[in-house]
Amino acid sequence: MKKFIPKFIFQIYHYLWALIGAVIYGFPTRKLVVIGVTGTNGKSTVVHLISEILEKTPRPAQGRVASFSSVRFKIGEKEWKNMLKMTMPGRMKIQKFLRQAVKTGCKYAVLEITSEGIKQYRHKFIDFDGAVFTNLTKEHIEAHKGFENYRKAKGKLFQVLEKSKKKNKFVVLNADDKHSEYFSKLAGNVKKYYYSLKDLEKINLQISLPGEFNKYNALAAFCTGLALGIEKDKILEVLKNAKGVPGRMELVIEKPFRVFVDYAHTPDALEKVYNTLGKELICVFGSCGGGRDKWRRPEMGKIADNYCKEIILTNEDPYDENPLTILDEIESGFSKFQISNFKFQKILDRREAINKALSSAQNNDTVIITGKGCEPWMCVAHGKKIPWDDREIVKEEYKKIYEQGF
């Protein structure tokens, strides 16, 4: 249909559905303090950490907390896995979720906001009180027809906030990211909070989550807590004891070798994960989203080439694209075939690929499986979705190997 129907017709369709959803469910965000979290990487973790802060500290507006991300939905004490294979639900589902939050006594809603969701007006008729920017690197470039359009899509969250009639509006911005000032300008005179790694020692922030990227995530949540009027010491106490998000740098096997599962599916995220774990890794990955963002495949190959002693390329949501073509394009980024101890394989069956990585690991090795995290499905040709969870597959294959006397 998209080939024959003018683009503006689809825009009207998406806009009207957003309006109808808000009308049917009574514009629920007028009764909530709503924080939107956007950026390329780290959104789900920041949503999780902000929710933790709100749930575990005294605050000016008491009441339950609702949140949604690519990982989960949560309203008060009720929590369920995001099974949609999309971060932001459809417009009607979002408004229904927010209405349920109000009915349950929630005062806050923390929402992961994506560029694709904004493109389809899923953010419309949500009255935001705050917007958080994590970072910006290349992603969804083909879908948005260029990086600048991708950035503009993200920027619409800050424009909506600037026009919001809510009081005490705020934005939280990553001062170490060069795009922060762009979003700052779009937010106009809204109160601004900036965070930087230079702040770590100054505020004595301590977290148990691994990686420099998680320090950024914690700082974003910290500033959001301050913006909401929560005491500094109370925020720091929550962050010090905060647990990670499922499928984000999750340690699934600890001994005799370590096995991590992570969602990283962009070059920037992949490098940050590998850099945290060190060199000489055993890596299992593919390239998320068949038919889109083909530019990143050789880039991910280059990064893996730099960090991994063994690479197993495998299937990862190919949709209707030939999965072997995807793997060939990743392979084109490799440069060290001439090194004798470099091991590389293509195994389309993701379960078999995971088994192979576990079988080859020796004591004290690190295996890292990226691209899906705790996603519940693998999407293949003809719209078929296969139930999946990398973490569970790792446990099952690990058990098989040891039962066979490995």
Image (cartoon, rainbow, N blue to C red):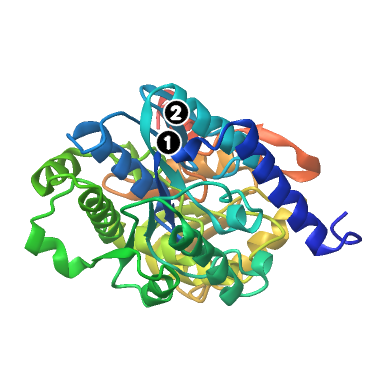
Q: Which mark is residue 248?
A: none
Residue 349 or residue 188, whichever sits in front: 188
Residue 373 or residue 398, whichever sits in front: 373
Q: Nearer the viewer, mark 1 or mark 2?
A: 1
The image position of residue 101, as x and y in percent, is 45, 28
Q: Are marks 1 and 2 in contact (CB under 8 Å)?
A: yes
The image position of residue 40, as x and y in percent, is 46, 61
Which residue corresponds to the image point at 45% horizontal and 58% vertical from the top-left?
A: 161
Give the labeled residue for mark 1. Answer: 31
Q: Which mark is residue 102?
A: 2
The image position of residue 6, as x and y in percent, is 86, 63
Residue 76 or residue 168, whichever sits in front: 168
Q: Earlier in the sequence, mark 1 or mark 2?
A: 1
User: Amino acid type of disc 2?
Assistant: Val
Which residue corresponds to the image point at 69% horizontal and 51% vertical from the top-left?
A: 15
The image position of residue 144, as x and y in percent, is 65, 67
User: Amino acid type of disc 1?
Assistant: Lys
Q: Is residue 244 visible?
A: yes
In which quadrant of the rendered view does residue 339 lie? bottom left
Which residue corresponds to the image point at 48% horizontal and 48% vertical from the top-left?
A: 127
Element under disc 2:
helix
Q: Decide: few, some or many residues near mark 2? Use Cα within 10 Å; few <14, some 14-19, many ≥20.
A: many
Rendered position, 333 above or below 283: below
Q: Decide: few, some or many residues near mark 1? Use Cα within 10 Å; few <14, some 14-19, many ≥20.
A: some
Image quadrant holding the C terminus, namely top left
Q: Is residue 323 left or right of residue 193?
A: right
Element under disc 1:
helix
